[in-house]
Image (cartoon, helix red, strand yellow):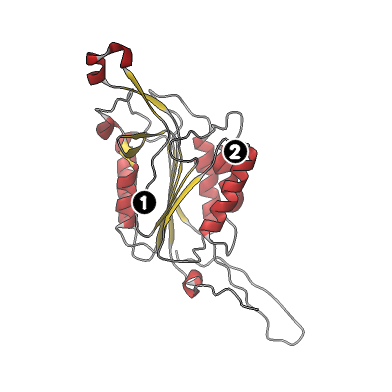
Amino acid sequence: MATQKIDSTAFQPRRKLALVIGIGKYEHCQELENPENDANDMSSALESIDFIVTKKLHLKRAEMKHAIIDFEESIEPDDMVLFYFAGHGIQWEDQNYLIPKDSPTLNDTNLNNSAIKAQAILNTLSDRNPYVTIFLLDCCTSYHLHNPEVDARNPNASVSKSVGLKPMHKAGSLVAFACEPGTIAIEGRGQRNGLFTKHLLQHITTANEDIQMILRDVADGVIKESKSSQIPFVSASLSKKDIYLCSQQRSQSHKPGIHTSTFYCSSLR
C-alpha cells in the first residue's frame, strides 16, 4: 500500500511569528463585541504552539501602521509568519481596507488616508521572504459609503453599498476570510467569539495538520453552524506543502518491548 510522502521541511525548526490585532471600540463606526476576545484567545492559542505573538488591541491608524512596520522589520528569511485581524473591514474599488479605531465616517475619497490597505500589508510581509505568510481576516463587514461627488450630481444616490472583501493573492501566502468575497460574516453577538474565529480556535493548534486541511475543518464547522449562510474563503498561492503550524515528531525507545513517544512543537525562539 502506498504511503503519503511528507515534506521533510515540515519538521524543520524555524521561528514562528504572529501579529494579532483586534479592534472593536470604534470611535465613529459601530462597535463590535467580539474582536478583543478574538485577539486575546487567538494570541493564547498561538503562544501555546510556540508562536512569538505580538498582540495589539483597539489601535488608531498611526498606531496600527507602526505595529505593522515593527512586525515587518522583525521578520527574517524562512520565518513562518501569521497575520490575524478581527474588526471592521471594507472593499472599495478593488481594494480591501482594514478599519482602525479612529477612522472617521468613511467615504471613498478618504479611505487611503483613514484606513489601511490589506493587500499592502500582505505584500510587505511576504516581501521579507518568509517560509510562508498566513493571512487571516475575520472582518467581512458591509458599509454604506458616502460619496460627495455622487451627492452633488444626484442627492438621492448619495449612498453606495460595499459588501464584504475581494479576493487577495500573493506568492507564498495563504489568505483566509471569515466569509466569501462579496458576502457578510455573522457577528457573534452574545457569544465570546465571532463564528469564524470560534472554529479557527478549535483547530489551529492541531499538530501535524497542514494549514489548508485545518481551514477546511474550520469552513465545515462554520457552514454547519450557520446553516450555510456563512462560507469561509481561502486563497492559497503556496510553494510549500505540509505547512504545519505545530509540527510534532515521534521518538521511540530502542528498548525491546517498550514503546515511548515524545511530542514537541518544532520552532526556534
Q: What residue is shown at x 28% (from left), y 21% (from top)?
A: 147
Q: What residue is shown at x 54% (from left), y 75% (from top)?
A: 5
Residue indicated by mark 2: 228
Q: What residue is shown at x 57% (from left), y 32% (from top)?
A: 188
In space, the residues marked 1 and 2 are separated at their CA atoms by 25 Å
Residue 197 at x, y percent in the picture: 54, 43
Mark 2 crowd level (few <14, some 14–19, many ≥20, 10 Å Cα): few
Residue indicated by mark 1: 169
Which quarter shows the N terminus?
Answer: bottom right
Which quarter shows the C terminus?
Answer: bottom left
Q: Nearer the viewer, residue 236 or 196?
A: 236
Residue 23 at x, y percent in the picture: 44, 35
Question: Where is residue 98, by image quadrant?
Answer: top left
- Reply above or below: 263 against 38: below
Residue 70 at x, y percent in the picture: 32, 50
- 206 vs 90, left or right, is right
Q: Residue furthest right?
A: 257
- Reply above or below: 168 against 63: below
- Reply above or below: 32 against 167: above
- 218 vs 63, left or right, is right
Q: Amino acid at mark 2?
A: Ser
Circles 1 and 2, Cβ within 8 Å, touching? The answer is no
Q: Nearer the viewer, residue 112 or 94?
A: 94
Residue 201 seen in this snapshot: no
Which numbered marker is on residue 156? none
